[in-house]
Image (cartoon, rainbow, N blue to C red):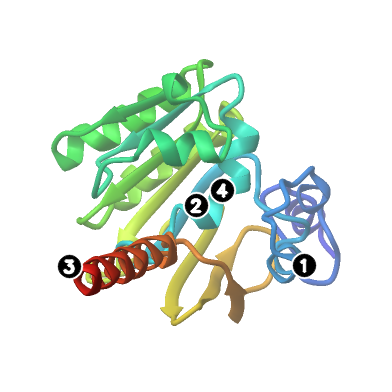
Amino acid sequence: MSDRLTHLTVHPHLWRASYKTSSENKARIPSGFTLLDSALGGGWPQAGLIRLRTLQGIGEVELFLTLLQHMCHPHLLVFINPPGRIQASWLIKYKIEPDDVVFLTGTHEQNLWAAEQCLKNDACQIVLVWSGQPLSLTQARRLQVNAKQHQSVCILFEYQHVLRQSLPLELDLSLIREQAAVTLNIEKQLGGWPRVGLQLTYSPIPSNNSILSAFTRYAQTYSKHEQVS
C-alpha cells in the first residue's frame, strides 16, 4: 500500500466498515429506546446536524425528548419556525424550564441564519428547525460544521413533501406513524450503517380518556336529575 493511500485510510473523516473508528466510541445520549440505541451505537450523537423527514404532529419532537432534556440544562433550547405553539405545561411535564426556551420565526433564509448563530453561541446547545423548503448543500454544510465545532446539535425537521436531497449530515432519519407505533428508518449515519423498519412504541398525543370520562359522568348526573324532576 502506497504512503498516500495509507495516509488516506487513517484520516479521521474516513470511515471503514471493517473497523470501528474513534468517533463511534464517543459518548452518546440514550434515546430511551433500546432498539434505536443499538442501531445508533449507543444513542443520539452529541454534536452535528440531524435531519428527520416526517409528517407534522406524529410525535417527531417527542422522539428526541431525552436529547432535549440532556442538552438544554443549563443552556437555551431554541425552536425555529415550529408548526404550532409549544405549551408550557408540556415543557414542565418533561422537566424543561419554559424560561430557557426561545421561539424564533422568519423567512427560510432568516431561519437558517438564526440557527447558525445559535449554534455558535455558548448559551445554546440545541436548536430545532422546521423547514418547508429544501436546504442547499452549502446551507446544510454550514449547520453541520458549526454544530460540530461548537459541540451542539441542530435537528432539522423536513416535511415529506420536500424534495429529498443528499446532504452532509451527522444522522439522517425518516419517520412514519402507524397507529400506536412509529416506524423509524436510519437512512444514513456518520460512522455507522443504515437501518430500516425500527418499530418504536410511544404515545405522543395526550389521551382523551379523562375528557370522555368527564362527559360520561356529566351525562349520568344529568340523566338522574331528569328522572328526579
- Counting residues from the N terminus, which is met first, the one under dot 2 or under dot 1? 1
Q: Position of residue 3 (x, y in %)?
A: 82, 53
- Asked if marks 2 and 4 touch (Cβ < 8 Å), the reply is no
CA gap, disc 3 and disc 4: 53 Å
Residue where numbered disc 3 is placed: 229
Q: Position of residue 192 (x, y in %)?
A: 70, 65
SS at mark 3? loop
* 143 vs 30, nearest the viewer: 30
Q: Is residue 81 left or right of residue 210?
A: left
- Counting residues from the N terminus, which is met first, the one under dot 3 or under dot 4? 4
Residue 50's mark? Answer: 2
- Asked if marks 3 and 2 touch (Cβ < 8 Å), the reply is no
Please state which amino acid type lies under the numbered disc 1.
Ser
CA gap, disc 2 and disc 4: 14 Å
- Identified at 60% across, 37% down, the residue is 69
Q: Is residue 155 left or right of residue 225?
A: right
- Camera-side mark, 2 or 4: 4
Could you say which quadrant of the image residue 139 lies in? top left
SS at mark 4? helix
Residue 12 showing in the rendered view: yes
- Camera-side mark, 3 or 4: 3
Please state which amino acid type lies under the numbered disc 4.
Leu
Residue where numbered disc 1 is placed: 38
- Identified at 27% across, 41% down, the residue is 85
- Camera-side mark, 2 or 1: 1
Please state which amino acid type lies under the numbered disc 3.
Ser
